[in-house]
Image (cartoon, rainbow, N blue to C red):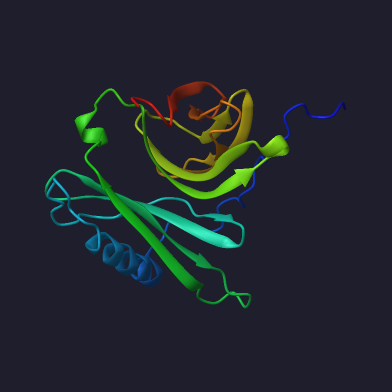
Amino acid sequence: MPPDQRPIPRFVAEPPHEGLPYGRFGEALAHRFLAACADIEAGDEEIGEPGEITWFPDRTYAGRTYVPAVAPTSSGVELFGFVSYRRSASGGEGAAYETFADVTAETAAANPDWTLDLSDHELEDYLGLEGRRGTITLLWGRALVPDGAVATAELGTTTTDQCPVVDDRFTLVSLDDYTGDLLEVRLYGHEGRELAVESLYEGE
């Protein structure tokens, strides 16, 4: 096989290892996520009271496990973010917890034409050959069309990650904004048929 003309990192994150959070673990994550949400500066929009948290599949990158979340609020905006931690070597509770939260008024409820509802967060910079720069990005989303089985991250013509869809939810980790290419997310059914595609930069 000849050398790759554009070597980039692919499938850099571990696959999901746990089910969606529930019980005491889910409560502990929710406490941390809601505490981060309470620290958000409201700005021009009233945030309101958080509703039920929706959790997304965990992904582990560079030794840290990320569990994304979203929650609607009483004012019609949406809170989004994640709780991350380092797994204990003994298999016990995680350690070194970190939390990120933000708010958006761009919601699926206000955009009935959406087929995918995506959120993202930049994890770190990536420096490639000849000084080319990109960003390793965590993104999570919900399929708004039925029968989704697998979601993929696509950078130009290269598939950089994929994740099984669990209760219409998925989480991806991918290089983004590299050599002129920007991330797209594609949703496939059980027979490999493409059901939806959306750019991470749709509307920008």
User: Looking at the image, can residue 24 be seen?
Assistant: yes
Judge left or right: residue 55 versus residue 104. right
Q: Nearer the viewer, residue 112 or 102?
A: 102
> Where residue 7 sits: x, y (%)?
73, 34
Q: Residue at x 21, y 34 (%)?
A: 109
Residue 23, percent from left and from top:
36, 68
Name the spot of residue 200 as percent of width and height, x first. Answer: 43, 32
Instruction: Specify the quadrant that holds the C terminus.
Output: top left
Q: Is 194 on the left or on the right of 158, as rendered?
A: left
- The answer to which of 124 and 38 lies nearer the viewer is 124
Drawn side of residue 46 relative to residue 89, left or right: left
**Rendered image quadrant of residue 107:** top left
Horizontal side of residue 123 vs 77, given as left or right = right
Corner quadrant of residue 88: bottom right
Identify the residue at horizontal 13%, vertical 46% (top origin). 45
Q: How many marks?
A: 0
Nearer to me, 96 or 22? 96
Q: Residue furthest front?
A: 131
Q: Is residue 162 visible?
A: no
Q: Residue at x 29, y 55 (%)?
A: 53
Q: Is residue 46 above or below residue 131?
A: below
Residue lying at the far right of the rendered structure:
1
Indicate the position of residue 110 as horizontal and vertical percent values: 20, 31
